[in-house]
Image (cartoon, rainbow, N blue to C red):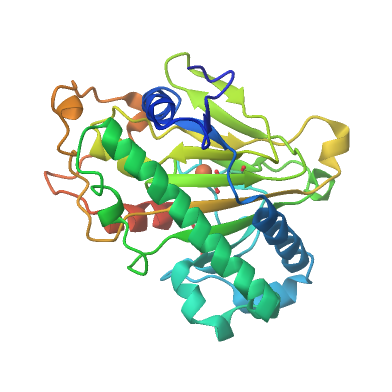
Amino acid sequence: MSFASLPVINLKSNPDDIRQTLLLASTTTGFFYVSNHELNSLQNQMFSMAKEFFYLPLYEKLLYVSNPTSYDGYIRIGRENLDSTNLKLIDEKEAFKMRESALNRKDKLPNIFSHEENFKIIEQFFRQCYDLCMHLFQYLAETFQIDKDYFTSRHKWNQKPGVAIKLLHYPPINQIEQNTNVIRAGAHSDYGSLTLLFQHDNKSGLEVFDRLKNCWYPVEARNDMIVVNFGDVFEYWTKGMIKSTIHRVILPNNINEQNQSRFSIAFFCVPNGDTLLTPIPSKLIENYIYTKDEHAKHVFNDNDGHVLTAGEHLQMRLSKTHQY
Ligand SMILES: O=C(O)CCC(=O)C(=O)O
Ligand SMILES: [Fe+2]
């Protein structure tokens, strides 16, 4: 398993192979590709919709601006800066975030998303991303020799804070003011349990950080494969055995790509809010020697003995990266 070429989980391969690759990927790179999934056409429809939204004039997008209680809605450039260790670094991206509860408040969504056909696509996309995560969780539970429903029972659909979709647009960099300290998405780990990342038009820029070698590796953008990564929750649940790998999106150095937008879509799977971030009851974890990792400072900060819940952790991380 290497960061230079991320492992691939072929969903149509045999379950033993899937379990084995999943265990290796989760404990080494924390990132892998999923091939042979069934989200291709939905994903393309989601990208068309996202483009239509981001090309609206700013004043229209601002009608749906996100707020510090829910963090849902439109996030304008500079308002979410993912590297919370470098407050001067600005993320040149705009985003639109919807939690699954947005599906119950259709009238509050921009017309592009509430329009009947598009709304159906969003619903299906939510559901299929969620089902894919649950499927991977069952394999993972088997790998760790715990109850098959251990993870899925902590991710009940329709419970707070709820899974979320984030549409992302990174504008062409010739539109960026000179002399500013910018990146497309600052270095960060994800806050939930699992993230599905859909890339588009083969636009590169995503990089993953190898803690052992202390260097960054590019992740090839593949339209046909989903990039999947583990978030902080699994790092807590497994005493650091599963890695919540740090990643970022850099500005392109290729002049062609500099003049173009980059679009991506993230699906964030998060456990139900009251889920405790205590180690899973697996023999593999019991025997695992917990080493406090310098790169997991964001995860293992001192909580004075208080056991965090997934909801508290999420809120804490969100409040550090959003400016209002
Ligand atoms: O746009 C990308 O490729 C990555 C985005 C990301 O990592 C995030 O929003 O958490
Ligand atoms: Fe991320």
> In the depicted view, which residue is nearer to us: 298 or 287?
287
Specify the farthest residue to the bottom: 107
Whether residue 235 sits left or right of residue 258 in the image: it is left
Report the residue at 52% width, 57% height from top: 128
Report the residue at 41% width, 22% height from top: 28
Q: Is residue 174 visible?
A: yes
Looking at the picture, does residue 248 appear above or below residue 312? above
Residue 121 position in % (x across, y down): 63, 67
Looking at the picture, does residue 107 appear above or below residue 242? below
Q: How many marks?
A: 0
Residue 16 position in % (x across, y down): 38, 27
> In the depicted view, which residue is nearer to us: 299 or 136?
136
Res. 303 image quadrant? top left
Residue 65 position in % (x across, y down): 59, 72
> In the depicted view, which residue is nearer to us: 89 or 155?
155
Picture quarter with ligand 1: top right
Whether residue 151 sits left or right of residue 81 in the image: it is left
Report the residue at 44% width, 73% height from top: 101
Q: Is residue 301 visible?
A: no
Report the residue at 23% width, 47% height from top: 150
Whether residue 307 sits left or right of residue 251 in the image: it is left
Res. 312 image quadrant? bottom left
Specify the farthest residue to the top: 213
Residue 254 position in % (x across, y down): 83, 30
